[in-house]
Amino acid sequence: MKTLTILKYQWKDLFRGKWIVGYGLIYLLIADAMIRFGGAGPKAMLSIANIMLLLIPLVGMIYGALYLYQSREFTELLLAQPLDRKTLFWGLFGGLALPLALAFTIGVGLPLIYTGMIVTAQIQSMLLLLVLGNVLTLLFTALGFWLGLKFFDDRVKGLGFALVSWLFLAVLYDGLILLTVFSLGDYPIEKPMLALTMLNPIDLARIIVLLEFDISALMGYTGAVFNRFFGSMLGVGVATACLMLWLGIPLWRGVSLFNKKDF
Amino acid sequence: MIKLKGLRKDFGPLRVLNDVSLEIPSGQATGIVGPNGSGKTTAIKTLLGLVRPTGGDIYIDGKLIKGEWDYRHKIGYMPQTARYPENMTVDELFTFIKQLREVEQSNEKELIEHFGLEAELEKRMRTLSGGTRQKVGAVLAMMFDPQILIFDEPTAGLDPQSSVRFKKLVRKEKQKGKTILLTTHIMSEIEELADYLIFIVEGKVRYHGPMKELIEKQQEERLEGAVAKMIEETVA
């Protein structure tokens, strides 16, 4: 009940700020353009997926931390009221993560509907894309929250860490993996590579996308290993479990930091 | 009754509250005095659960408040620097807090009138002056008629007229039997409003008891002199 009151206020405030509408519009424009130029097939969806894999983590983390800083007054006001800290945390998190997820879903979903892709293309792939986007949104907002709480009094540090984490996970990590493959290519490194991929939620999501659109063959030998592993029930299970861990741990740490914090 | 028992708070290596044990009597006004940075605000914030104590316990009406939050129904708090969500209008803020507390009944109308806030209701918080924000804070603290009122330097940003009005209101609340806790640097204010005095220096309680006794003990006419004397004694 109280969480709902908090959520309602925050959503109102967020939509008053209008940038969230802009965020949804970006997805709308991208999805529309991709479908227009790439045709209503898996190619368009793949392009959308690629952009989503970069944009969602960036916005989620940066805005997750920023939002916490912005809501400081709100938090202080509410903490003096008869309110559980946990309730407040979930109110704050839901107040940002849910609108972000909604903006993404509508932004990508609308073009899928009005271009008729929803009938012609594979429904399973589209659903996967949307679900993955939503999970990533929650996950990276949670990471942003955790960083924001960790460096609550040092905004520059918090935002800096968010930016660097994004750069590392979205860009550098792949380069490092590639470097490993190059230098250790003569050894049987498929299994460790699998493990390394599991450690990065963006890579995890990317591989799920690649497998769904069946282009893992492009990745050569490693692709075959991934295909064999992730294609199995075990693979899907492990990948899902890893994503859930990535979602759960920052939230768990976030709640406990928030609980102990002095305001 | 509010009871602090062996309360300690460390911010890193800095000990802000050092073994504070005292009782704040019900139905009376208690003033907390002390130099800047002596731990007054921290003490109040631990009482509200905004700051988690390193050690020690706080009891309100005989109940330990550690990990609890429901007890804050009994408390109205007016912070030192009133900071509120910037995009909210004053009216929205009052409505929101009412919904959050799940309380329909409130005497906000009278309070708004008392502080002359009628013209500000539709304005956003960020456009308000510091003094007006303080008034909004005062309304928020008192609108639910709580049993305990906590004011942290309430008159610091108020103009003389509003300050007088505020003090009038506090006296009225006191007559209603409320427990009032207030910090201020203006000694005449404490003299005017409080019956009971707590004096903190560097996180330690140096005096707590009825105000009159302190003045008599220090052989001074006014509180200001007595407190100044006490600060000198602790430094020496």
Image (cartoon, coloured by chain):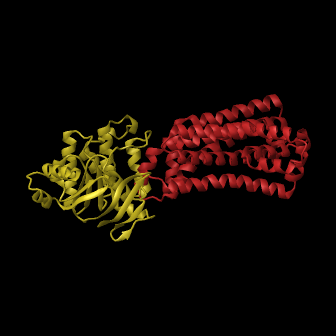
Chain colours: A red, B yellow
Task: Name which residue lies at 87% across and 55% down.
Answer: A232
* Residue at image coords 37%, 70%: B63
Does residue A157 lie above or below B40 as drawn? above
Whether residue A125 sits left or right of residue B2 in the image: it is: right
Q: In the rendering, at what x and y percent does residue A243 appear? A: 72, 52
Query: In x, y percent, where is residue B203?
Result: 32, 55
Front residue of A28 and B59:
B59
Instruction: Work out whether B63 lies above or below A196.
Output: below
Does residue B53 appear left or right of residue B211 in this picture? Answer: right
Q: For residue A43, which quarter of the picture?
A: top right
Q: Relative to A16, is B190 above or below?
A: below
Identified at 79% across, 57% down, the residue is A237
- Quarter assignment of residue A207: top right
Q: Looking at this rendering, what residue extends furthest in the bottom direction?
A: B62
Please give the name of the residue rendered at 39% of the width and 43% of the height, measured from the top-left corner.
Answer: B83
Q: Tell me if A191 is positioned left or right of A157 in this view.
A: right
A220 and B219: which one is in front?
A: B219
Q: Position of residue A133 (x, y in %)?
A: 71, 44
Give the farthest residue toward the top: A37
